[in-house]
Amino acid sequence: MKTLKIEWRHLDVAGETCNRCYDTGENLNQEVKRLNRSLKPQGIEVEWFETKLDDTQIPESNVILFNGIPIEDILKIEVSENYCDSCTVLLGSKTYCRTIRYEGEEYEDIPAKAIRQAALKVLGLDGALPMASSGNTGCGCNSSDSGCC
């Protein structure tokens, strides 16, 4: 079976992370489940793991790597930063954290769509779930609403 390994790097302070990292983690967890439902029958497995960072590694926080390659090197993503109230509270000092610009929008978390597109691109599947057909997003809900999951 072919395996795609995804690493999620994020701030961890006594088991807590900031809101934007938390949202990225939720997006990643759900997207890996969706990808595995679609890809396992084709002999492809997606695994993910997290690397917890301390307050000295903030610039590396909220980063996703696909087989060691950062998402911004796979897709057209611009990386920037802005003030993070959540990290500021966690760390007790004014903190600026990573943001991304993807498809013309700025995000503080990494959206599921970007995670899916990067995974499929790394796997050479050109941005579309192979088993997806009209009326079925591959999530099992048989909805044509691509936002169902």
Image: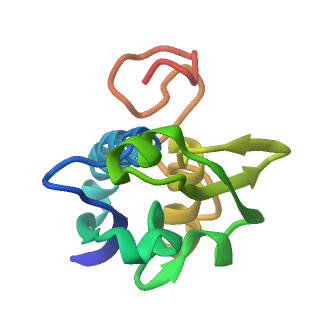
Q: Is residue 84 left or right of residue 65?
A: right
User: Residue 61: x and y, percent?
Assistant: 44, 66
Residue 149 visible in the shown view: yes
- Above or below — where is 9 with respect to 23? below
Foreground pick, 49 / 122: 49
Q: Is residue 57 left or right of residue 115?
A: left
Coloring scheme of the render?
rainbow
Q: Is residue 94 left or right of residue 51?
A: right
Residue lying at the far right in this picture: please name it.
104
Based on the displayed image, in which of its 4 quarters is residue 33 positioned?
top left
Residue 124 visible in the shown view: no
User: Residue 37: x and y, percent?
Assistant: 27, 44
Q: Quadrant of the C terminus?
A: top left
Residue at point 21%, 76% (across, down): 1
Residue lying at the far left in this picture: please name it.
14
- Above or below — where is 143 with respect to 78? above
